[in-house]
Image: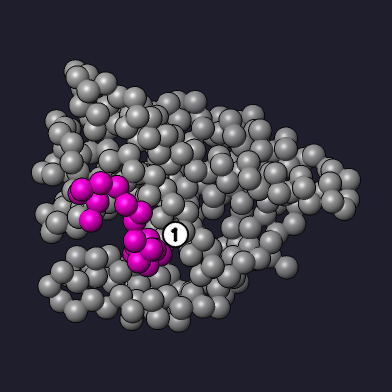
Amino acid sequence: MHLHPLDAAPSGRGATRFAQIRLRLERIEPRRGWPAHVYEFLLFGFKQGWACLFGGLLLALLLGTHLFYPDHAPIARYDFLTIAAILIQIGMLALRLENLEEAKVILAFHVVGTVMELFKTTAGSWTYPETSFLRIGGVPLFSGFMYAAVGSYIARIWRIFDFRFDHYPPRWQTIALAGAIYVNFFTHHWLPDIRLALFAATALIFGRTMIWFTPHRAARPMPLLVGFLLVALFIWFAENLATFSRAWVYPDQAGGWTMVSPAKLGAWYLLMIISFVLVSLVHRPRARQG
């Protein structure tokens, strides 16, 4: 079983608490046959849940404050969400539930996401209906943490499942594709939308790429494009919960909540490409051994 340098010495200063727990769970040897398959499935779910801890806590805060936050609280709900997200991040670092490299990724996503939010809210793509003090223009600062949650998930899942790749494309191609996608999120408001061409480019560049992930002992393969689509689907589910909680609203939700259009899946799919490429600058893609 391959171990990351971080996990090889779980009692060391750099090891996260989760790495210590995970290493103990990975050392368990269930009986062959269905017990082994069930255990692998449960361990897969445990690792997935841990990888999306930051996003899960943030989504719970969105829903909880929507249902229970006092109307006349001295701190606006959006400001409370911003402060809570910062405290969660500090707590995860202090308790070694997250490492510094992952925190850097989260910061990068926060910046990239906030810039996009400033533009998109100005263009009227969506709005934040509640008041707040901690904001830039029409964008409350907690919004950047929602993008950061995606970056946190990818960075953590990459390490936790020991990602390896077959036929991973050259780095310059992935960076160029991510850059084109990001620019198109802005320019399609004035220039022709090249989204279909970008979908085709993702298929061309990543079409042969297989990702190998290790839930327990054996590495399991999956086409990387399928992985992008699955994560985009779960983000869309989370987006529906977030808009239900009035974290933000789309124009067609101004009169009351309605399900987010499935067409948004395409946008999240492209955002996944940007997210994955950004994380790949920290966790360099490694070829599968053997």
- Classify 11 as above or below 235: above
- The residue singled out by tag 1 in the image is 232
Q: Residue furthest front?
A: 255
Q: Position of residue 104 (x, y in %)?
A: 37, 44
Taking the spot 63% from the left edge, 45% from the top edge, the residue there is 45
- The quadrant the C terminus occupies is bottom right
Q: Is residue 111 left or right of residue 92?
A: left
- Classify 225 as above or below 156: below
Decide which of 95, 240 is in the foreground and name it. Answer: 240
Taking the spot 38% from the left edge, 76% from the top edge, the residue there is 199
Q: Position of residue 127 (x, y in %)?
A: 18, 48
Decide which of 160, 254 is in the foreground and name it. Answer: 254
Q: Quadrant of residue 211?
A: bottom right
Q: Position of residue 282 (x, y in %)?
A: 44, 53
User: Count the marks: how many?
Assistant: 1
Taking the spot 13% from the left edge, 59% from the top edge, the residue there is 123
Decide which of 104, 29 is in the foreground and name it. Answer: 29
> Where does the magenta region start and end?
252-269
Q: Is residue 149 left or right of residue 48?
A: left
Type of amino acid under label 1: Ala
Q: Is residue 104 left or right of residue 6?
A: left
Q: Position of residue 2 (x, y in %)?
A: 70, 51
Number of other residues with Cα within 10 Å of mark 1, as a class: few under 14, some 14 to 19, many 20 or more: many
- Classify 274 as above or below 3: below
